[in-house]
């Protein structure tokens, strides 16, 4: 009951940010993947349609947005294009609500994780929650990246319960493939370099790898069209060169370099702790995700892809601040 009250209170307190998300998506003011037709298709509306790969594999994310589509009334906006039908604005609002609530839940789970795994005091745990919420805005928040961040954070919260962790990873295959990919990369790195982690989480690591393989099988079987370059290793060099060139543009600096720099700064200020889930070697996750983004995405995606690793760096960064705050002062 206490957690539900906090969630309800935060939802009301931060409600202007829902309308911000809604406006950003409705007026198409920032680059984002448009899932509106997919949600309309799920509802059986003739204006809907199944998107290309890889978006089509994220059916469960649309299923999570669908209740909001049915429950939310039409929310009018000034100067909204007349060609946008009301049913489309309702779908946009539903997707905005999904992302909005996902950011709040991510913050709440981060607070819990900060208390249990990071052993932060109340004030620094709240700061960690606020930082997690803020970093979500570096992702494609007007789409479904916030939902992926929520699942990754929830996975860290359930990692000591193998069945719950496995259930979450199984569901993530239909929510967003980046969830299992980020977790699998992190766990493989930790398994290879951290004996304590290797002894503690062998089943969970196998589960994350299995989720990635299951998604690969799904793609191989269904073979939905779209973004074929991601499945052609021969074209990775060309994609890599185009992406590196994009980094030097003003747009590349904002969408790619800045988010990576922010996360790298958090990784650099973290102390080595005895917390099993947070170690300095987790910083290797950042260059690994940069490489993944360089060869599997195009132009302006790297920053938001790398920011999916934020849950691994928020709590240690606040741990560093807490450690400095508790150091004895020189007389």
Image (cartoon, grey):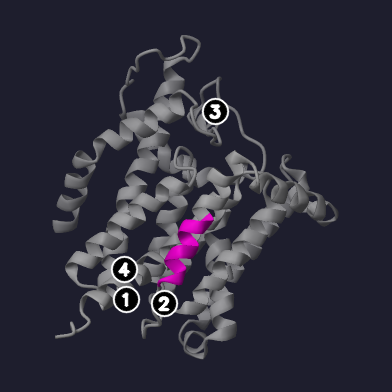
Does residue 26 appear left or right of residue 112 in this picture? right
Where residue 38 sits in the image (x, y, percent)? Answer: 54, 33
Where residue 292 sits in the image (x, y, percent)? Answer: 66, 59
Q: How crowded is mark 3: few (under 14 residues within 10 Å), some or many (20 or more)?
A: some
Marks 2 and 4: in contact by CB < 8 Å?
A: no
Q: How crowded is mark 4: few (under 14 residues within 10 Å), some or many (20 or more)?
A: many
Mark 1–mark 4 distance (CA, rounded to whole Å): 13 Å
- Residue that mark 1 sits on: 117
What residue is shown at x 29% (from left), y 58% (from top)? 129
Mark 3–mark 4 distance (CA, rounded to whole Å): 40 Å
In the image, residue 223 above or below residue 19:
below
Mark in front: 1 vs 4 = 4
Tell me the element at label 3: helix
Tell me the element at label 4: helix
Q: Earlier in the sequence, mark 3 or mark 2?
A: 3
Does residue 244 appear left or right of residue 212 in this picture? right
Tell me the element at label 2: loop
Magenta span: helix, strand or loop, mainly? helix
- Residue that mark 2 sits on: 277
Residue 231 painted magenta = no
- Residue that mark 4 sits on: 318
Magenta segment boundaries in residue numbering: 260-269
Mark in front: 4 vs 2 = 4
Name which quarter of the figure residue 311 lies in.
bottom left
What residue is shown at x 70% (from left), y 48% (from top)? 243
State the residue lying farthest toward the top.
82
- Residue that mark 3 sits on: 37
Does residue 22 appear left or right of residue 192 in this picture? left
């Amino acid at each position: 009951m206490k957690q539900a009250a906090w969630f309800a209170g935060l939802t009301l307190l931060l409600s202007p940010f829902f309308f911000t998300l809604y406006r950003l998506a409705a007026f198409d003011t920032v680059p984002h993947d448009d899932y509106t037709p997919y949600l309309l298709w799920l509802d059986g509306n003739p204006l809907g349609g199944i998107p290309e790969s890889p978006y089509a594999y994220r059916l469960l994310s649309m299923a999570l947005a669908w209740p909001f589509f049915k429950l939310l009334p039409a929310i009018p906006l000034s100067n909204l294009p007349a060609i946008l039908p009301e049913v489309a604005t309702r779908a946009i609002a539903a997707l905005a609500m999904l992302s909005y609530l996902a950011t709040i839940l991510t913050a709440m789970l981060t607070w819990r994780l900060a208390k249990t795994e990071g052993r932060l005091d109340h004030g620094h745990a709240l700061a960690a929650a606020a930082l997690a919420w803020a970093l979500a805005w570096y992702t494609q928040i007007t789409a479904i990246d916030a939902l992926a961040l929520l699942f990754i954070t929830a996975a860290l919260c359930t990692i000591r319960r193998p069945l719950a962790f496995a259930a979450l990873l199984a569901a993530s295959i239909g929510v967003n493939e980046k969830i299992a990919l980020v977790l699998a990369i992190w766990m493989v790195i930790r398994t290879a370099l951290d004996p304590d982690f290797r002894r503690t989480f062998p089943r969970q690591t196998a589960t994350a790898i299995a989720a990635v393989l299951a998604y690969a099988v799904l793609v191989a079987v269904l073979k939905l069209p779209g973004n074929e370059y991601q499945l052609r290793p021969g074209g990775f060099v060309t994609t890599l060169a185009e992406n590196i060139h994009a980094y030097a543009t003003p747009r590349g600096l904002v969408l790619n370099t800045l988010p990576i720099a922010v996360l790298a700064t958090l990784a650099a200020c973290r102390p080595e702790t005895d917390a099993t889930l947070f170690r300095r070697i987790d910083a290797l996750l950042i260059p690994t995700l940069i490489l993944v983004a360089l060869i599997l995405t195009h132009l302006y995606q790297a920053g938001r892809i790398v920011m999916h690793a934020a849950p691994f760096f928020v709590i240690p960064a606040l741990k560093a601040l807490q450690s400095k705050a508790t150091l004895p002062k020189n007389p």
